[in-house]
Amino acid sequence: MAKQKQSIQITFWATLVTAFLLTGCNDQRNQPECRDVYKSRLEKDDFEIFDGGVALHIPTGLTVTQCAVGQRMSNYRCRGDSLKMTWDEAMDYAAEVREKTGEPWRLPEKGEMPDILESSCINPAVNPYVFPDLEVANFWTASKGLHQDKFRCSVYTYQGRVFCRQSRDIPQPFLLVKSD
């Protein structure tokens, strides 16, 4: 009797854990790649593109770099390699840009990144004509994690999810934003 009760409990917990894991995962196998969703440069949706590799996200009022920091816009493409910095280095870089340009450039907050990304497509979850060649990677945000001080928030550009347990010492790319 005791073995049967233990077997039922194990089965129950295994079923519960499996159900939790499956419902906690968002199956994105059927989501289209963003390059298949956006067919033309004219489809900028909520963005206004400016010279110099920046775009205005109209709903939020955020101006965002179209390429990762370290790259430059040339002939509608991001050229060069993105800078990969630790969170502290990325924050210092943004502060230096603010100081030298006199403009309020900064890393985006964790809630701002999903606003400028696309939720209807993946790989990366961006309009490829607004953010050409954006690499699939974890991108730093300015937000701190809720846990220990060694964690910060990043956004995985494959599907645009925020992750706030990213070690702040890992070099990663980042975008810059400013509010007008």
Image (tube, rainbow, N blue to C red):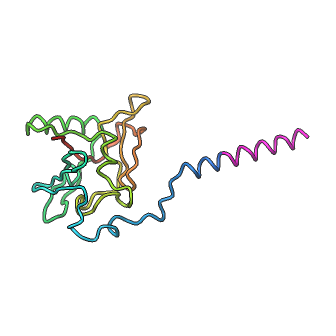
Q: Which residue in the rendered view is the most extreme toward the left?
A: 101
Q: Position of residue 71 (x, y in %)?
A: 19, 54
* Residue drawn at x 16%, y 52% as measured from the top left: 54
Does 126 sit above or below residue 180?
below
* Residue drawn at x 18%, y 47% as measured from the top left: 63
Q: Position of residue 120 (x, y in %)?
A: 39, 59
* Residue drawn at x 15%, y 41% as measured from the top left: 180
Q: Nearer the viewer, residue 102 or 74?
A: 102
Q: Position of residue 56 (x, y in %)?
A: 18, 51
Task: Examine the image and state in which quarter residue 80 appears.
Answer: bottom left
* Residue drawn at x 51%, y 58% as measured from the top left: 27
| Residue 11 shown in magenta | yes
Q: How many marks?
A: 0
The magenta-colored residue range is: 1-16
Instruction: Tell me the chief SS of the magenta region.
Output: helix
| Residue 171 shown in magenta | no
Q: Which residue in the rendered view is the most extreme toward the front?
A: 59
Q: Which residue in the rendered view is the most extreme toward the right?
A: 1
Residue 58 placement, left or right of 146: left
Q: Position of residue 57 (x, y in %)?
A: 22, 50
- Which quarter of the rendered picture does the N terminus lie within? top right
